[in-house]
Amino acid sequence: MKTIEVVAAIIVKDRKIFATQRGYGEWQGWWEFPGGKIESGECPKEALVREIREELDAEIEVGDLLETVEWDYPGFHLTMHCFICSLISESMHLNEHEAAAWLTRETLRSVKWLPADEGLMPLIENLL
């Protein structure tokens, strides 16, 4: 089975986390933490800064690794490195996503998370 290695930003601000809704593909409409594939020659933190710049026109500071998620989707295995991040500037623009939201501990489970992201909910709740 093919393995895809990605990074995800757990952007935290004022006891809320930032989530995005996929606007394309098989999982359109599902919610996820923003991020994407690690390109050849990149370390995970560099990939995350690049991906957030591309997806959100935003600058982030990448902090500690929260968790590495291993998940089998139909057709591929996902390795997702999830980092706690903060915004350097408040400006963001959705270039690839349908919607976005700042979720509190109480609203965290109110959206339909992608299966790999769903497993992070207990860790995220502890952050908030």
Image (cartoon, grey):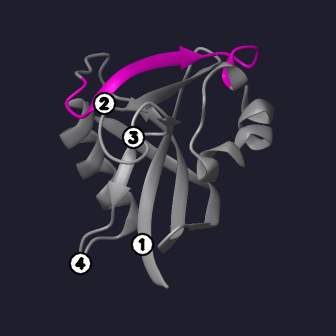
Q: CA distance from mark 4 to mark 1?
A: 12 Å
Location of mark 3 (residue): 61
Q: Nearer the viewer, residue 66 or 114?
A: 114
Residue 25 left/right relative to 83? left
- Please say if 82 is above or below 9: below
Q: Amino acid at mark 4?
A: Ser
Q: Earlier in the sequence, mark 2 or mark 3?
A: 3
Foreground tag (3 vs 4): 4
Are dots 3 and 4 in contact, CB under 8 Å? Answer: no
Residue 22 place in picture, x, y as percent: 38, 35
Q: Nearer the viewer, residue 38 or 30?
A: 30
Residue 61 place in picture, x, y as percent: 39, 40
Residue 40 has which mark? 4
Residue 91 left/right relative to 86? left
Q: Amino acid at mark 1?
A: Ile
Q: Earlier in the sequence, mark 1 or mark 3?
A: 1
Q: Quadrant of residue 71?
A: bottom right
Location of mark 1 (residue): 4
Foreground tag (2 vs 3): 2
Residue 73 left/right relative to 34? right
Residue 88 place in picture, x, y as percent: 33, 28
Residue 126 left/right relative to 57? right
Q: CA distance from mark 2 to mark 3?
A: 21 Å
Q: Is residue 122 magenta?
A: no
Q: Earlier in the sequence, mark 4 or mark 2?
A: 4
Q: CA distance from mark 4 to mark 2?
A: 24 Å
